[in-house]
Amino acid sequence: MKIAIVKLSALGDIIHAMIVLQFIKKHSKDIKIDWVVDESYEELLKFNPDINKLHVTNIKKAKKKKSIKLFFNELISIRNLGPYDLVIDMQGLIKSALISRLIRSNLTIGFDKNSIREGIASTFYNKTLNYGYEKNVIERNVELINFALGLNIIQNNIFKKLPFLFASKKYINTKLSNTKKNILLVPGASHKSKCYPILNLAKFTTLIDANFFVIWGNHKEKIMAEKIKTKSPSINVCEKLSIDSLISLISQVDLIIGPDTGPTHIGWALNIPSITLFGPTPGYRNAYLTELNKIIESNSKVNPFKLDKKDDSINEIGVDEILKVAKVLLDR
């Protein structure tokens, strides 16, 4: 059997979908799995041994460049993929649904119109699953695969997952400590209201004897990282890391702390202890609690169908709350 999974973006969303790969292969090693992804996230999937072939699309680039020629070339390229026995759209957007339907296959599967934000996307599928959009995203992905392939992946399988992100080589950072716990802080996120206050992160670094690293992905996040260092000079601000290097670094630390964003979810994927901080996004939906992976939520009532980017309730989370959870995880 040959299948294609369509999950184009973003970092955290792709990670939450990738967990299904090991379960599919455990069911049958003979199933060939190809994956269609935006070129920005190629490194995230490139070295996963459960993926037979990675198809990279540049539709996002075509849209940015407003190039009709590039856009249609990408569509032609997608049309030439296959044939497949089955295509599964794990994104649930109009764009991903169109791509899924263009791929040559016997069957295209996705969520129904009541289970995704862009309900019209469901019209591109031959077969659909009803599973609430507000439910946990990892469980949604698992149920879609159960539905598509007739599997029986259960909660206990998720708890016992194997790490499923892989780097091409070990990232060497000479400042990693052999005597102290290494803690990685993530100050940035996709929008400001998801970010935890810089001063609070800096204060946290003074309350626990550990070796701290701060990562960043763009100019604004670099400024945030440097501001933390001005308040806590002993921390290490990393260079700009590729996804490949980021995976390797996170695999070497003892704890990662950050908001609801891709790098924090990498910790979960690698079975590295993590604390994810939630304000304007729903923790019950966007994370999966384990003995190693904890969340701290604000008291905000979040509507998963319409996130409020003006919700700054993450600021209400106390540094002492983070410290308490961090000590438990580091003492394991």
Image (cartoon, rainbow, N blue to C red):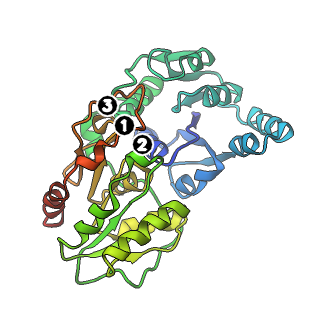
* Mark 2, other Cα within 10 Å: few <14 / some 14–19 / many ≥20: many
State yes or no: discs 1 and 3 in contact (Cβ < 8 Å): no
Q: Label 1 is placed on what type of residue?
A: Ile
Residue 29 falls left or right of residue 94: left
State yes or no: discs 1 and 2 in contact (Cβ < 8 Å): yes
The relative height of residue 86 versus residue 12 in the rendered view (above or below) is above
Residue nearer the viewer, 233 or 68: 233
* Mark 3, other Cα within 10 Å: few <14 / some 14–19 / many ≥20: some
Residue 200 falls left or right of residue 123: left
Between tags 1 and 3, which lies in front? 3
Residue nearer the viewer, 231 or 144: 231
- Give the mark, 2 or 3, whose residue is nearer the N terminus: 2
Question: Residue placed at 42% from the left, 27% from the top?
Answer: 306
Residue nearer the viewer, 172 or 1: 172
* Mark 1, other Cα within 10 Å: few <14 / some 14–19 / many ≥20: many
Which residue has dot 3 on it? 302
- Real-space CA distance between mark 1 and mark 2, rounded to the nearest whole angstrom: 6 Å
- Real-space CA distance between mark 2 and mark 3, rounded to the nearest whole angstrom: 20 Å
Look at the numbered disc 3 and give the secondary structure of its residue.
loop
The relative height of residue 54 versus residue 211 in the rendered view (above or below) is above
> Is the C terminus in the top left, top right, bottom left or bottom right quadrant?
bottom left
Image coords of residue 175 (percent x, y): 37, 83
Which residue has dot 2 on it? 16
Image coords of residue 200 (percent x, y): 27, 61
Which residue has dot 1 on it? 138
Q: Label 2 is placed on what type of residue?
A: His
Image coords of residue 312 (percent x, y): 34, 43
Q: Quadrant of residue 248?
A: bottom left
Look at the numbered disc 1 and give the secondary structure of its residue.
helix
